């Protein structure tokens, strides 16, 4: 049973510590929209999104006023479009319908322009993937994802190679916006079906017809709690984070349950992730530095992040009826002022970030690289990150942005996307490695039934 007084105790965190509900995301199944006619499929997609999510923004705004907790984003995720538009081949038409629906109901983003190709790429999945440069450069609110690996299937290296080239094409198609189209695409290993966070959200085939998934936040709250136990040992640090995560998650649980009632949807999950923003004091990097690191990226950063991720999960899972999504701590470079500063001072490299992704919620997120980075290098970065996910049986992802015309400096994207410093990639070629193609087999520990 939720204790309202327990929730009200967190209100003071809103004003000074950047506590917020990062997103209410409505997942919508589109299987009943399938037809062999492009226009009919697109029309059905638009109508269902508007019907189900038409009051999502108003509901989020009303709950924010009622409980005094900002609800930053209202979003929708849909069934992977590669499945919905396979019969009609109307991928672009469905994308346009999604974008128009998102604008008409006033939500921030809509995810699910997605394909699941961890074991092989069908003709219709390839068609969706090849449409990504055009779709992501033309639409404003559509987000996309491609799952190229899983612990059960291994790594589809043909898909990794394909995505390396596609990301370069998206960057070129949106080069007037510094490759911003790439910020709306995530390449996954072990993608989950109930992720509320963009750009990787989609409503998986196993999900209900209409569900509410809530993503919480609050790095500033955790940082403030740790400041009060400065100098204490790591057992105290862990306990402090657990207790704080419990309080934060309670707020998310309350909002989720109320949204379900108001919208007539099913309750999905609360995602426990600490999601940073470019706002000062809302940084995961600062939490790691509060543990004693001079700068994130220093030796010990991976251990500190492992502690944080584990403690957040332990505290949050006790506060939620159903925890899910990604749940843990995010380390997106451009969206975290502490990460940005660490890159700029030379303390944080792609290689160190990759090591840290073995113990965090997702992976290499919002990484800007030079525009002349070869497609094979991008594909190899995707493969490396997928290997971490596949071997460790966890979700990993890559959201990488080649910025044409830049080899150094930083790029301003604004809003939650923040400022992305150009990160150096290896000068040595991965071309022959990527050319091999095929599939890297699943690890031996995947053979469980």
Image (cartoon, helix red, strand yellow):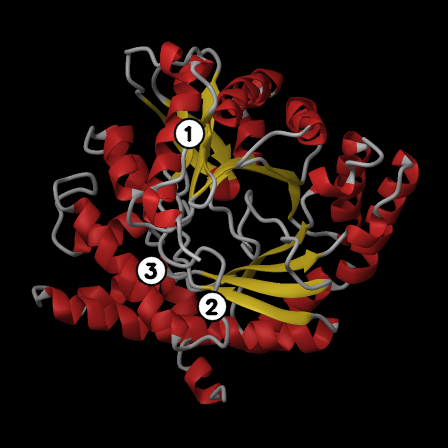
Disc 1 secondary structure class: helix
Instruction: Describe the element under mark 3 as helix, strand or loop.
Output: helix
* Label 1–label 3 contact, CB within 8 A: no
Q: Where is residue 187 in the image (x, y as percent from the top left)?
A: 50, 35
Q: Label 2, secondary structure: give it.
A: loop
Closer to the N terminus: mark 1 or mark 3? 3
Q: Which of 162/12 is in front?
A: 162
Q: Which of 4 and 249 is in front in this view?
A: 249
Residue found at x 39% / y 57%:
274
Report whether 378 appears left or right of 253: left
Res. 254 in view: yes
Mark identifier at residue 220: 3
Q: Work out how far the residue at label 1 is from the one at label 3, CA to CA, in angstroms.
A: 31 Å
**Residue 336 can be seen, yes or no:** no
Q: How many marks?
A: 3
Residue 121 is situated, as x and y percent measured from the top left of the image, at 61, 29
Marks 2 and 3 sit apart, C-alpha to C-alpha, by 21 Å
Image coordinates for residue 10, horizontal then vertical, percent = 40, 76
Considering only vertical position in the picture, is 178 above or below 372? below
Q: Which mark is residue 155?
A: none
Residue identified by numbered label 1: 382
- The image quarter in which residue 196 lies: bottom right
Q: Is residue 361 above or below residue 95?
A: below
Count neighbours of disc 2 (C-alpha within 10 A) and say few if under 14, some if 14 to 19, many if 20 or more: many
Q: How far apart are the two marked residues, 2 and 1, measured between alpha carbons?
A: 27 Å
| Residue positioned 40% across, 81% down in the render | 9
Circle 2 is placed at which residue position? 323
Horizontal arrangement in the rendering, residue 209 relative to residue 374 (left or right): right
Residue at 47%, 40% (x, y): give it: 153
Q: Are marks 2 and 1 in contact (CB under 8 Å)?
A: no
């Amino acid at each position: 049973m939720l204790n309202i007084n327990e929730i009200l105790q967190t209100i003071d965190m809103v004003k000074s510590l950047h506590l917020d509900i990062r997103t209410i995301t409505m997942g919508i199944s589109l299987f009943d929209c399938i037809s062999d006619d492009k226009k009919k499929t697109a029309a059905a997609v638009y109508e269902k999104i508007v019907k189900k999510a038409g009051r999502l923004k108003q509901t989020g705004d009303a709950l924010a006023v009622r409980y005094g907790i900002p609800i930053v984003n209202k979003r929708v995720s849909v069934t992977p479009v590669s499945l919905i538009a396979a019969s009609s081949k109307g991928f672009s038409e469905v994308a346009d319908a999604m974008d128009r629906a998102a604008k008409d109901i006033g939500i921030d983003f809509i995810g699910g322009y997605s394909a699941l190709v961890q074991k092989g790429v069908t003709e219709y999945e390839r068609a969706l993937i090849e449409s990504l440069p055009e779709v992501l450069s033309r639409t404003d609110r559509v987000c996309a994802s491609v799952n190229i690996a899983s612990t059960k299937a291994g790594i589809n290296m043909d898909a990794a190679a394909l995505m390396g080239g596609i990301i370069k094409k998206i960057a070129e198609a949106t080069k007037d916006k510094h490759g911003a189209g790439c910020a709306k695409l995530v390449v996954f290993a072990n993608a989950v079906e109930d992720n509320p966070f963009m750009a990787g959200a989609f409503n998986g085939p196993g999900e209900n017809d209409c569900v509410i998934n809530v993503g919480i936040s609050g790095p500033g709250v955790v940082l403030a709690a740790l400041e009060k136990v400065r100098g204490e040992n790591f057992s105290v640090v862990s306990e402090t984070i657990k207790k704080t995560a419990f309080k934060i998650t309670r707020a998310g649980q309350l909002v989720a349950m109320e949204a379900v009632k108001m919208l007539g949807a099913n309750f999905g999950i609360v995602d426990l992730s600490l999601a940073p923003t470019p706002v000062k004091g809302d940084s995961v990097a600062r939490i790691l530095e509060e543990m004693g690191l001079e700068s994130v990226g220093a030796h010990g950063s991976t251990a500190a992040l492992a502690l944080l991720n584990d403690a957040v999960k332990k505290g949050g899972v006790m506060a939620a009826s159903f925890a899910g999504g990604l749940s843990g701590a995010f380390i997106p470079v451009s969206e975290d002022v502490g990460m940005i500063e660490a890159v700029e001072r030379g303390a944080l490299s792609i290689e160190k970030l990759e090591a840290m992704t073995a113990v965090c919620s997702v992976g290499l997120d919002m990484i800007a690289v030079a525009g002349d980075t070869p497609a094979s290098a991008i594909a190899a970065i995707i493969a490396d990150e997928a290997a971490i996910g596949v071997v460790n049986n966890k979700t990993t992802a890559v959201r990488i942005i080649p910025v044409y015309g830049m080899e150094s400096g930083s790029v301003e994207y604004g809003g939650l996307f923040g400022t992305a410093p150009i990160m150096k990639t290896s000068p040595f070629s991965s071309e022959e490695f990527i050319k091999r193609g095929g599939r890297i087999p699943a690890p031996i520990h995947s053979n469980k039934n």
